[in-house]
Image: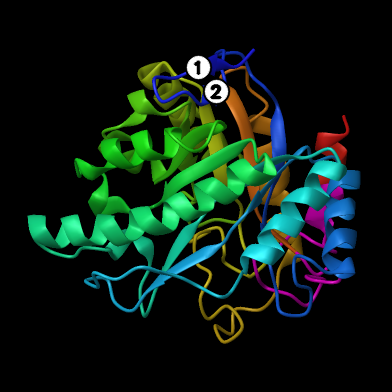
Amino acid sequence: MAVLTGCGIERQPPLGKAWQGRRGANCLQVAAAPLNSQAAAESLARLREVGADTVAFIPFLYQETAASLEVSRSDAVTDEELLAAIDAAHRLGFAVVVKPQVLVGNGWAGTIDPGDEEGWRQWFAAYSQALLHYARLAEQQGAEWLVIGTEINRAAEQPQWAQLIAEIRGCYRGRLTYAAHNIEGVHGFAYWHLLDCVGVSYYPSLGGSAALPDLRRAVEGAVDRLAALSREMDRPLWLLEFGIPSAQGAHREPWRWRQLDEAGDGVDVGLQARVIDLWLENIAQPWLYGALIWCWYSNPRAGGDADPHHTVQNKPAEALLRLHWQR
């Protein structure tokens, strides 16, 4: 049952603490298969057939440098493409997450820092304008979740978040979360009490050894740290991103996504499969709201045995998703 807020729009009731079993992927658009294409519809249907029940779509924002005061909506995903993707996902039975992320020229969102108090005020004015645009689109299309930010580490304690959350609540009735960067990012974000669950993107190093017993100990330790975080926060915890490239040595830096083609390390789809299998085995826990793997592309022919990137498509890891999610 929805409930009314002070601004008159209906909101969903608070989440319970029990595991919801949300399983799915972050879906990225590629040029070969726009999100409003038949190819993208086929890719979503494949993800659903594998056993996913939740999909996150990522419209990108852009700023030129980490210190920029201007944040613009990127044309990497158009509104038309995003709306079509949400509609297609709903027709397949998915719950949908709209997850805007900021691209930074020669950097990443965790480095964003406009400097002083006035710089943050201007940055948040631009960022809020973009987020409210996507909140309205999410409301228009009935998306179940909106992520208000992803890994914007240095903004974590800025007071403008409270106003932005209130403004989003005024035009969007779905649920809200934030994607903190690793466990320290969860500790640094000051506004969980205004959101519906604790979100985290989590790519811990799995050590120097790719031997299965060592990988198992590393993944178990990483999940133990998430369990401790869940107890500490006493709120539903959602693993909004996890995964590993299918590249040799990727267990050392599972977060690395740049220059994989040029790194010369070679492709290792077997390593990716072993690590994904261990993650899926260990995160089926009663304290976890769910988990979204990084990543799945709009092109159903993406990935494959020669691909070193994070996608699990057309690789042994995809078969393991099917095994765990359909169990």
Which callout, 1 or 2, points at the residue further toward the start of the chain? 1
Query: Which dot marks residue 4?
Result: 1
Report the quarter where the C terminus lies: top right
Q: Nearer the viewer, residue 130 or 202?
A: 130
Number of marks present in the image shown: 2
Query: Which dot marks residue 165?
Result: none
* Residue 217 x, y percent position in the rendering: 55, 38
The stretch of residues the image draws in magenta is 298-320
* Residue 179 x, y percent position in the rendering: 45, 44
Quadrant position of residue 142: top right
Task: Locate residue 176 relative to residue 84 in the image: left or right.
Answer: left
> Is 96 a magenta residue?
no
Task: Locate residue 295 relative to residue 127 in the image: left or right.
Answer: right
| Main SS of residues in magenta | loop
Q: Which residue is depicted at the point 51% across and 22% down?
A: 236
Q: Is residue 158 visible?
A: yes
* Residue 103 x, y percent position in the rendering: 43, 69
Quadrant position of residue 251: bottom right
Q: Nearer the viewer, residue 45 or 185?
A: 45
> Is 302 a magenta residue?
yes
Dot 2 falls on a residue whose secondary structure is strand
Question: Which amino acid, by three-letter code, is at mark 2?
Answer: Glu
Q: Residue furthest front?
A: 8
Query: Which dot marks residue 10?
Result: 2
Dot 1 falls on a residue whose secondary structure is strand
Disc 2 crowd rating (10 Å Cα; few below 14, some 14-19, many 20+) is some
Q: Does the CB distance between marks 1 and 2 fall below 8 Å?
A: yes
